[in-house]
Image (cartoon, rainbow, N blue to C red):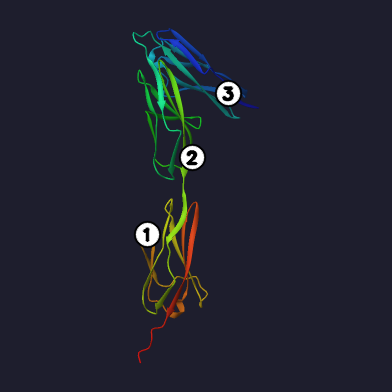
Amino acid sequence: MIKPSVSLANVKTVLEGSSVLTILCNAEGIPVPSVTWEYLEKPSLPHNARQVAHYLVFENVSSIDGGHYVCTAKNSIGIDRKVVQVIVKAINEHPHIAPVIHAPSTIQEKYYTEARITCNVTGDPTPNVAWIHNDNPVQSSGNTLVIHSVTNATTGTYTCIATNDAGSSQANILLKVTYDVPKIVTPPVTSVIMAGHAHNFTCIATGHPEPKIIWTYNMFTKHTTDMPSHHLLKHDSVLTLYSVTTQDSGLLTCTAQNEFGEDHVSVSVIVRSPNPVG
């Protein structure tokens, strides 16, 4: 049993108006792999192209047939892909200009934010633009690729490929993702509360993704983790204890947590009886 292996020319150049262009995708493997052809820039093959066995065959070649074509070989063991660039040469009255790409080498975005990857492309005639992500074709066209929510799965190398009948150019852009572990910047403070009174505790944290605030409580005398009577405000960043008794004294802990880490602060809450009136 052997996984597929594809042999395919990197570039095929043909004159516009040629009656036939034939491209062989030589695929080996055991079991014998199945072969399919796809047009990288568009969802289907041109109307004048068809697959015959392992061959991609064009009839009456025109300038719009230029681009990148993907041969995929698959069997029960695995899969292999190769890309061939078809360049259609035409006799022009004025020279055409091959594509030139200006693009950043690296883009860095935070988790779950939008990323816009742009290739500034020049050339005459206007080049077609195709995208590849980590060696896999991306179903998108145009100079800007939009990733709506950046995650580990969307990071990696994006290749922008610009093609016209004068040639082809490509640029690699590395998309990195960043995060910030939580850090409590406004912690709660140790407090002395009169029995029966209410008191606010604030816990504000930074981090990305935005951390969740979790409050926990350990009473000194009751040896319980039950939280005294309370309510939460402002996305849980403000905790109000009310109707507390002297038996509610304990240790209050604020924990700021996201998927990359946590930070916590613990403070004492002392509940005292009001002074008797003499």
Question: What separation in Å lies between label 1 and label 2 (alpha carbons)?
Answer: 29 Å
From the image, tell me which residue sits under label 1.
Answer: 235
Could you tell me how far apart the alpha carbons at marks 3 and 2 are, in whole angstroms?
A: 28 Å
Question: Which residue matches tag 3?
Answer: 33
- Relative to 11, does residue 193 appear above or below in the rendering? below
Residue bearing mark 2? 153
Q: Amino acid at mark 1?
A: His
Q: Residues within 10 Å of mark 2 (few under 14, many from 20)?
A: few
Residue 176 pos. (x, y %):
47, 40
Quadrant that contains the N terminus: top right
- Vertical comparison of 261 with 23: above or below: below
User: What residue type is disc 3 on?
Assistant: Pro
Residue 42 appearing in the image: no
Earlier-in-chain disc, 3 versus 2: 3
Q: Nearer the viewer, mark 3 or mark 2?
A: 2
Crowd band around label 1 with a 10 angstrom C-alpha radius: few (<14), some (14–19), many (20+): few
**Callout 1 secondary element:** loop
Residue at position x 43%, y 55% in the image: 211
Q: Residue furthest bottom?
A: 278
115 horizontally vs 264: left or right: left
Upstream in sequence: badge 1 or badge 2: 2
Residue shown at the point (47%, 12%) measured from the top left: 13
